[in-house]
Each structure stands twice: as structure tokens, then as C-alpha cells.
Image: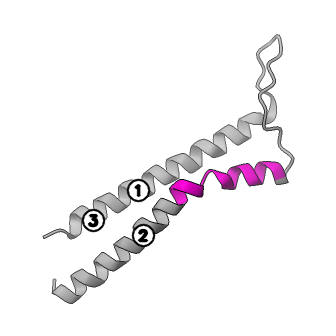
Amino acid sequence: MTAAERKEISQRIALLERASALFDRFGTLVPMAIAFLNRWPTEVQVYPQWQVGESWRLFLSLYFYWLASFALSRAVSFAQKSIEP
């Protein structure tokens, strides 16, 4: 691999790293916005039967976005390590 190719790949990885950092910072706002736009209940209502109600959608979507953020950051770190000489 030439130095020019290595530099181009490093720039692309740096761009992906910045996108990953933004997704990590603001990614959880997406499910919150979707929840409020769809009028999902965002509070956990505890009844005598310990029912969670409809808020499980919000918590599940927050978890999936956190998991996607974690996977993206791990992919960036693996890509950085693979390009090192």
C-alpha cells in the first residue's frame, strides 16, 4: 500500500470517527424525538401489577441506538488499528 493510499484511507477513517462521535453524542435524541412526535408515553407508570405500559418502545429504541453507537465506535477503532503499519 502506497503512502497516498494510506493517507486517503486515514482521512476516510477520521471522517467516520467524527460521524461516530456525533452519533454517540446526539444519537439518543432521535428516538426521543420520534417518541414525542408519535405521542408515545415516555414515563413509566407503575401500577399494582407492575406494568410498564407503552414506554417499552422508548427504552428499546434508546437501547438500540446506544448499541449502534457502540458498534460504530468499535468499527472505527478496528479500522484504525488495521491501517497502522
Identify the residue at image location x=54%, y=59%.
23
Please state if 14 lies on the left or on the right of 22 as rendered: left
Q: Amino acid at mark 3?
A: Gln
Q: Which residue is mark 3?
A: 80
Q: Is residue 27 magenta?
A: yes
User: Residue lying furthest top in this view?
Assistant: 48
Q: CA distance from mark 1 to mark 3?
A: 11 Å
C-beta proximity under 8 Å, tags 1 and 2: no
| Residue under label 1 | 73
Q: Which residue is mark 2?
A: 16
Q: Name the chief secondary structure element in magenta.
A: helix
Marks 1 and 2, Cα distance to the nearest angstrom? 9 Å
Residue 44 image position (x, y, % from top left): 77, 28
Q: Which residues are the magenta region?
A: 23-36
Q: Secondary structure at mark 2?
A: helix
- State the quadrant of the C terminus: bottom left
Is disc 3 surrounded by few (<14), some (14 to 19) or many (20+) residues within 10 Å? some
Residue 53, by quadrant, is top right
CB under 8 Å between callouts 3 and 2? no
Whether tag 1 and tag 3 are in contact, CB under 8 A, the answer is no
Q: Earlier in the sequence, mark 1 or mark 2?
A: 2
Quadrant of the rendering where the N terminus is positioned: bottom left
Residue farthest to the right, as pictured? 39
Q: Quadrant of residue 7?
A: bottom left
Ranked by sequence position, the earlier of labels 3 and 2 is 2
Q: Position of residue 38 (x, y in %)?
A: 84, 51
- Please report whichever mark, 1 or 3, sits nearer to the chain's N-terminal start: 1
Instruction: Check the image and name the residue furthest to the left.
Output: 85
Residue drawn at x 58%, y 42% is 63
Give the residue type at disc 1. Answer: Ser
